[in-house]
């Protein structure tokens, strides 16, 4: 027992740990916050710098555009001569007052410049003159004005007359005017701006008293200002060399941010400077307030932690129940099963088997007897499985009627014996008012090998075996083998080839004749689809039919067969043969979309075949789903004149009950009935079905008839037509046509 002192120590330790965790979290959060605020500072610098760049670019672009307009006006004067040059200068004087230039001028191709202030200068050696004669708009580097002193920048644009460059127009712009533009207040008057070249040399310096005074090169000034600026100089050089934007922190009495942005003019960069303290004052305020708030929250958290502790424990227990306890059975969920299985399969002292089980047709129990009865069945199954599982074994319900088990064994036969025992106990369950209804469990089994630790992969394997058990119906369980996986891959390959086979007309129609039981004459046939590859290889229907049904492609395939049969019947009628009715299978997928009726009727009408020569076969299982909708479809087909056949009668769960409510014309007795004809109970059942069908005026066709004895028995009890290998196997169109030629004679 834990005494009160130990409990107190535990609680104090818990609080201390919480405080330490909170402190660490606060430090971590502070670091993130500082980084975020640094990003905010950098983005602010970037935005302001971009605005300053736009101001400078707009000013220069406006001046260049103005000069361009003047050049176009001069170019319109025509051919140039001595007299025209004077006229040009007069024109420039008339417009110069509109622009912020010190002077304007014109220079012909000889390099002699005529300015508005009367000066005549040879500028043929200057780079902006040569560039403008090549058709470029130029801005010169600053240089001393030889006439009035002070630094100037020259703008120049080419003058074209009749598409030929005949000279340039230039204008001088005082650097002091550029300083005035850059002196626009930013960062509440704390910031200032330079323009420098890539090598750091000054283009335009700042008038701010806190800037570098008499700066000729920004790198030189930074080095001279403080020894700590060595790294900042290297970083700034790297930014300028790569023609990038970026910032450094340097010192000039105080720490300052310096943000560089390319101007897009010559190799000039705009340099914005602002004190670090100014930029980070807001950040520091936010961080200090954050510390205060976090301290208050930590105090509140410590107080609430004790109050919430018990509540959290309770919620945790509830969450575990939701995740790990099945609400219906009270047992484990699939999540709990997987968690336990991962721990237990690592025990090398035992050999384990994984099982998956469900009940065949469980959905029908809910539909026929109600969900309450279905839940009772599931709880009973759970009790049976739990009773047959040892203490170290696992069992869980995953979804609906599906259960998963992990069992241990010494011999594999032990597992198979336990499966049979579990099946026997499950089948003892009796549904009230339906005691004849028997539960049919199916199992998938996977025997774990040494080194099998991946529960998800194991579950996939056991699910594969379970699916094959459900499809096969020849055994209540299937054991996983690598062959199963190979077959699944083969099925996948076939599935991928089906669409191509359809387009390539590899699907062909075979016909299995039906014979009158009294006269032994050909009375009809069933159309069956076969897959014949170009090399003649036949793919078994047992392989591709389930695939087309699963994918929904069966609708297209059924329609293809229907159309082929209509065309074949038309050919035989045109040949003068005595044709017989041919029944075409209609899948459940078609019944989900009643629009197929109009499509089939259109196909039949286009073929010109009378409707009495085409019949439709529908499986009993398809009839059971959505009974009301199905009856409406049957009535519509009857109104059009189709004869409806119920295929595979006897394989469903309520065959006899369905006959009184489903409007079918012909009932095809399943082979399983025919095979049991020599059993006393089987014979009585067949006779009973025959009498009931006759009372309901439903014709009977027996499927799967293979022996003389079966034929004689069916004939004796009044079966109408016979279909099976006793008379004929399914055959291609040419052979079936020969059969009709015989009865035509």
Image: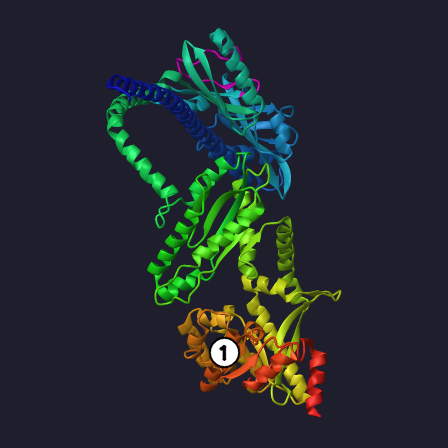
User: Looking at the image, which is closer to me, 161 or 719?
Assistant: 719
Residue 650 covered by magenta stretch:
no
Can you say which quadrant of the picture contains the C terminus?
bottom right
Quadrant in the rendering for residue 88:
top right
Give the crowd class for mark 1: few <14, some 14-19, many >=20 residues within 10 Å. few
Magenta span of residues: 197-221
Q: Residue 524: where, in percent of width, then height?
A: 61, 84
Q: Measuring 51% from the left and 21% from the top, which residue is drawn there?
A: 152
Q: How is the image coloured?
A: rainbow
Q: Quadrant of residue 72?
A: top right
Tell how many labels: 1
Left or right of 312: which side holds 424? right
Counting from the top left corner in percent of width and height, residue 705 is at: 62, 77
Is residue 73 shown left or right of residue 363? right
Quadrant that contains the N terminus: top left
Residue 217 seen from this side: no
Using the image as rendered, state which of residue 435 and residue 34 is in the foreground: 435
345 vs 498, left or right, is left
User: On the rendered structure, is 613 left or right of 575?
Assistant: left
Tell me, yes or no, whether the highlighted magenta stretch contains residue 219.
Answer: yes
Q: Is residue 258 above or below residue 46?
A: above
**Image spot of residue 681 (x, y percent):** 50, 74
**Residue highlighted by disc 1:** 684
Secondary structure mainly formed by the magenta segment: loop
Foreground of the two, 741 or 520? 520
**Vertically, is 386 above or below 511?**
above
Residue 306 % position (x, y)? 25, 26
Label 1: which secondary element: helix
Does the rendering let one see residue 55? yes
> In this picture, is 549 found above or below 464?
below
Which residue is depicted at the point 55% across and 64% down? 549
């Amino acid at each position: 027992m834990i005494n009160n002192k130990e409990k107190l120590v535990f609680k104090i330790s818990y609080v201390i740990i919480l405080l330490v965790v909170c402190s660490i979290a606060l430090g971590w959060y502070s670091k993130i916050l500082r980084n975020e605020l640094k990003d905010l500072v950098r983005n602010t610098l970037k935005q302001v710098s971009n605005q300053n760049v736009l101001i400078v670019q707009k000013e220069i672009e406006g001046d260049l555009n103005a000069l361009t307009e003047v050049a176009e006006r001069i170019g319109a004067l025509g051919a140039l001569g001595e007299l025209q040059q004077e006229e040009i200068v007069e024109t420039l004087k008339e417009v110069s007052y509109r622009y912020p230039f010190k002077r304007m001028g014109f220079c012909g191709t000889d390099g002699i410049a005529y300015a508005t202030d009367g000066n005549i200068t040879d500028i043929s050696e200057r780079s902006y003159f040569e560039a403008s004669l090549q058709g470029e708009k130029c801005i010169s580097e600053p240089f001393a004005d030889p006439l009035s002193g002070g630094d100037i920048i020259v703008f120049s644009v080419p003058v074209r007359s009749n598409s030929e460059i005949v000279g340039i127009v230039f204008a001088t712009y005082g650097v002091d005017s550029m300083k005035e533009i850059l002196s626009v207040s930013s960062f509440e008057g704390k910031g200032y701006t330079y323009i420098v070249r890539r090598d750091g040399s000054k283009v335009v310096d700042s008038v701010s008293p806190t800037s570098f005074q008499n700066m000729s090169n920004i790198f030189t000034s930074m080095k001279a200002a403080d020894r700590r600026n060595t790294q900042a100089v290297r970083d700034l050089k790297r930014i300028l060399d790569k023609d990038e934007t970026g910032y450094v922190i340097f010192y000039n009495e105080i720490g300052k941010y310096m943000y560089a942005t390319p101007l897009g003019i010559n190799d000039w960069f705009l340099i914005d400077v602002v004190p670090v303290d100014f930029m980070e004052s807001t950040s520091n305020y936010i961080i200090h307030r954050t510390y205060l708030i976090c301290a208050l929250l930590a105090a509140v958290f410590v107080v609430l932690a004790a109050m919430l502790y018990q509540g959290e424990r309770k919620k945790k227990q509830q969450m575990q129940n939701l995740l790990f306890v099945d609400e219906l059975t009270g047992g484990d969920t699939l999540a709990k099963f997987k968690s336990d299985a991962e721990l237990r399969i690592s025990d090398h002292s035992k050999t384990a088997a994984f099982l998956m089980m469900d009940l065949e047709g469980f959905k029908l129990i809910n539909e026929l007897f109600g969900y309450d009865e279905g839940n009772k069945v599931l709880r009973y199954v759970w009790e049976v499985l739990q009773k047959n599982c040892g203490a170290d074994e696992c069992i869980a319900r995953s979804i609906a009627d599906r259960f998963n088990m992990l069992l241990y064994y010494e011999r594999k036969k032990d597992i198979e014996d336990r499966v049979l025992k579990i099946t026997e106990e499950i089948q003892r369950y009796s549904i009230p008012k339906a005691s004849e209804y028997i539960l049919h469990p199916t199992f998938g089994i996977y025997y774990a090998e040494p080194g099998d630790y991946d529960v998800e992969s194991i579950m996939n394997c056991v699910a594969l075996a379970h699916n094959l058990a459900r499809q096969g119906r020849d055994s209540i369980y299937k054991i996983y083998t690598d062959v199963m996986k190979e077959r699944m891959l083969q099925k996948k390959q076939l599935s991928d080839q089906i669409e191509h086979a359809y387009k390539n007309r590899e699907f062909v129609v075979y016909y299995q004749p039906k014979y009158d039981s009294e006269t032994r004459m050909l009375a009809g046939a069933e159309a069956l689809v076969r897959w014949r590859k170009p090399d003649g290889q036949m793919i078994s229907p047992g392989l591709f039919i389930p695939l087309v049904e699963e994918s929904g492609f069966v609708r297209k395939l059924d329609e293809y067969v229907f159309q082929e049969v209509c065309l074949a019947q038309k050919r035989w009628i045109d040949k003068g043969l005595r044709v017989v009715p041919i029944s075409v299978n209609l899948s459940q997928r078609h019944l989900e979309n009643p629009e197929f009726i109009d499509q089939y009727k259109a196909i039949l009408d286009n073929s010109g075949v009378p409707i009495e020569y085409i019949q439709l076969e529908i499986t009993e299982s398809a009839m059971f789903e959505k009974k009301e909708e199905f009856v409406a479809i049957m009535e519509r087909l009857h109104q059009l004149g189709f004869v409806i056949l119920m295929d595979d009668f006897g394989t469903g769960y309520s065959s006899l009950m369905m006959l009184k409510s489903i409007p079918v014309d012909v009932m095809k007795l399943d082979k399983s009935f025919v095979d049991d004809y020599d059993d006393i109970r089987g014979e009585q059942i067949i006779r009973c079905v025959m009498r009931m069908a006759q009372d309901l005026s439903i014709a009977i066709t027996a499927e799967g008839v293979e022996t003389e004895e079966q034929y004689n028995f069916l004939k004796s009890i009044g079966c109408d037509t016979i279909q099976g290998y006793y008379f004929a196997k399914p055959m291609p169109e040419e052979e079936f046509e020969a059969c009709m030629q015989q009865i035509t004679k």
